[in-house]
Image (cartoon, rainbow, N blue to C red):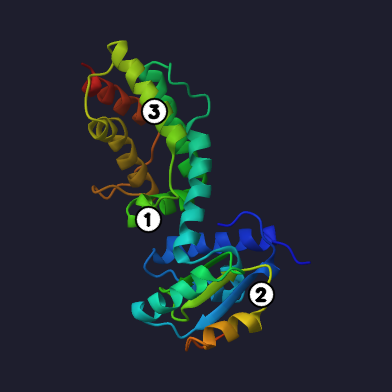
């Protein structure tokens, strides 16, 4: 578990990333993005929950970034 | 600015533990946990990255308490008899006070998660290793593989604990652990461990 964070810096989304191929395709996009500190996708979960830690990006910016690569995500409430 | 809510986090952990005790690891998911705890799945993902992260974190927390309990008044310099007796008594105290925690630790140990990089217990291992080396030096304990030592030194103890918790043995009796019965078994175990 990450030690120091505030809830504002953690963004959680439902995604349509279903296959390993889709995961691998999106991996470098998130790995190499300079504003993203940490991310993971819970591939075991039905909603393939994406969790992003960033101090600079908003939910909309993350959704916009991924949509450029064909990934649909929406905020998990 | 909102910050972490320690109470909410503790409530999620408690609920997770209850679910696992009731349904096992296979029946446990983030979605189910969220429903059971009355929080949104997003809340759980704020605290934990995924199911594995949650289970590891739960194990580390419970195991820390278990170790602190097991090491109470313990020192690697104790005689084999005194040290083993203290280990049995300390562990029994923890198990009887927290049967759900014990059940969780057992489930976890029998799952592949126990090999995860986030799981370690080096302090405990060092203490137990020192205890055995000292006992060998004093001629109280035969040299043997650690697994064989564990099987003989703790196997009988944990078997009795399970009979006690299940409130019955294979004979169908209502079995209860007592100091007297434990002492009786300890004597046999010490004989078996002698060089």
Q: Nearer the viewer, mark 1 or mark 3?
A: 1
Do we see residue B50 in this rendering? Answer: yes
Q: Secondary structure at mark 3?
A: helix
Residue sitting nearer the eye, A45 or B23: A45
The residue where tag 2 is placed is: A57
Q: Is residue B104 left or right of residue B170?
A: right
Q: Secondary structure at mark 2?
A: loop
Q: Nearer the viewer, mark 2 or mark 3?
A: 2
Chain of the residue on which disc 1 is drawn: B
Do we see residue B111 in this rendering? Answer: no
Chain of the residue on which disc 2 is drawn: A
Residue sitting nearer the eye, B8 or A20: A20
The residue where tag 3 is placed is: B128
Q: Residue at x 40, y 33 (%)?
A: B125
Q: Secondary structure at mark 1?
A: helix
Residues at discs 2 and 3 both on one chain: no
Q: Nearer the viewer, mark 1 or mark 2?
A: 2
């Amino acid at each position: 578990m990450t030690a120091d964070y505030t809830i504002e810096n953690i963004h959680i989304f439902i995604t349509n990333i279903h296959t390993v191929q889709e995961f691998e395709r999106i991996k470098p996009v998130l790995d190499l993005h300079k504003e993203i500190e940490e991310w993971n996708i819970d591939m075991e979960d039905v909603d393939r929950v994406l969790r992003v830690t960033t101090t600079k990006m908003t939910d909309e910016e993350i959704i916009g970034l991924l949509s450029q690569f064909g990934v649909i995500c929406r905020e998990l409430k | 600015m909102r910050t972490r809510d320690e109470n909410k986090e503790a409530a999620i952990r408690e609920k997770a533990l209850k679910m696992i005790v009731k349904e096992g690891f296979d029946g446990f998911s983030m979605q189910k946990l969220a429903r059971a705890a009355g929080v949104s799945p997003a809340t759980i993902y704020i605290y934990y990255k995924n199911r594995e992260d949650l289970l590891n974190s739960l194990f580390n927390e419970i195991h820390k308490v278990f170790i602190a309990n097991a090491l109470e008044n313990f020192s690697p310099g104790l005689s084999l008899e005194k040290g083993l007796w203290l280990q049995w008594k300390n562990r029994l105290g923890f198990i009887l006070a927290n049967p759900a925690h014990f059940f969780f630790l057992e489930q976890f140990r029998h799952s592949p998660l126990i090999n995860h990089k986030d799981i370690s217990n080096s302090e405990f291992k060092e203490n137990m290793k020192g205890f055995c080396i000292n006992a060998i030096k004093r001629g109280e304990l035969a040299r043997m593989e650690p697994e064989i030592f564990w099987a003989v030194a703790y196997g009988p103890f944990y078997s009795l604990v399970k009979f006690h918790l299940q409130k019955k043995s294979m004979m169908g009796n209502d079995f209860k652990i007592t100091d007297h019965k434990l002492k009786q078994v300890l004597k046999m175990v010490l004989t078996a461990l002698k060089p």
